[in-house]
Image (cartoon, helix red, strand yellow):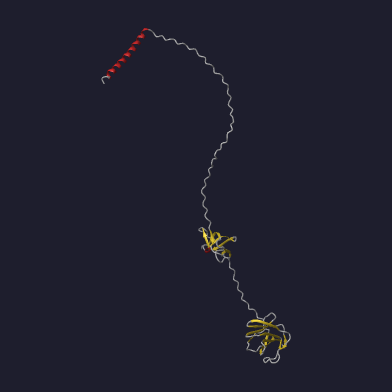
Amino acid sequence: MKTVRPIFMIVAAFLMLSIMGCSIGGMLVGRGQRWTPTPTKTLEPTFTPAPKATKKQSKPVPTQVALKPTQSKPTAIPKPTTPPPTPTPAKPYMIVNDNKVNIRRGPGTNYPALGQARKGQRFDLTGRDARGRWWQFCCFNGQKGWIFADFADTYNQAKVPVVKAPPTPIPPRPTATPRPTATPRPPILFDRTEGPLYTPDYNPILTIWVKVYAKPNIPLGGFKLIVLRNGTKVGEATSENVFHKTGPGPGLGLYKDANIKFEYPKPGTANWETYLADAGGRPVSSHERFTTSPSNVNRMIYIAYQHR
């Protein structure tokens, strides 16, 4: 600290001396002579060359440059925003679950049938009856039909509406069943006036003699003797307009008039029935019945019919 202080004092004294010297010199000069300003030389103007005229430049003609077409990306046109479509409800339908199912015009068996559906056939449901026992569908043979509910498996049927049934068909008035009219029996035209008379005949043949006549004793031709054995017709013989004589026999007496002769070999044991009939086969006399057997030798029979 002692060394620094003397140096600082020396520097300060030197500066003070310098300032004082400058001030004294100035004072001396001002007092001895005036200061005359040195004239300055006027500078001549220098030649500035005029600028050369520049040629008038013509306006540039634009040159047409063929531009290459630039492929710009098409601007996407924004699609209009549409609300999402409302889902379409599924159609109600049915499938026939049995074979030969009757399809009717209305919900009931009192309606006429349109035909029969087969198992597996599919139809669109269009309605139901109020009780839900019948379904209406389309189409069967070109028209709406009805099916009993037990014969159809249905799908999406919750909103199938109740539809009005068609008018019930008017049942036809019952017609009175005509009573069978009894076939009128042909009138009995002949009365039996003789017989049956039986006489033994040892030939194994059944022989039937018949007299068909009118009063007093006129033979009538064209009538038939019908012969049945055990209920089955086995033959017939037609009367002639002339009489023939029968053979004699214990039951017949001597000879008798007859215009019909019928023979049947080996009659055996049987039940027999005979009657007269007209040309159309209608009975015109009473029926005569008798039996035969191998032990019964009365194989010749005589009957006489008189016209009324």
**Figure disc tally:** 0
Depth check: 284 or 201 in front?
201
In the shown orientation, is residue 220 left or right of residue 57? right
Depth check: 285 or 98 in front?
98
In the shown orientation, is residue 142 left or right of residue 237? left
Depth check: 205 or 185 in front?
205
Give how far across and how far down residue 215 sits, in percent: 71, 87
Give how far across and how far down residue 265 sits, in percent: 67, 85
**Which quadrant is the N terminus positioned in?**
top left
Location of residue 176 (image quadrant): bottom right
Q: Residue furthest top?
A: 32
**Which quadrant is the C terminus positioned in?**
bottom right
Q: Is residue 156 above or below residue 66?
A: below
Q: Residue furthest right?
A: 242
Q: Residue furthest left?
A: 2
Give how far across and how far down residue 164 sits, in percent: 55, 61
Location of residue 18 (image quadrant): top left
Q: Is residue 4 above or below residue 115?
A: above
Q: Is residue 7 above or below residue 162?
A: above
Give how far across and how far down residue 104 sits, in percent: 57, 64
Location of residue 243 (image quadrant): bottom right
In the shown orientation, is residue 237 left or right of residue 143? right
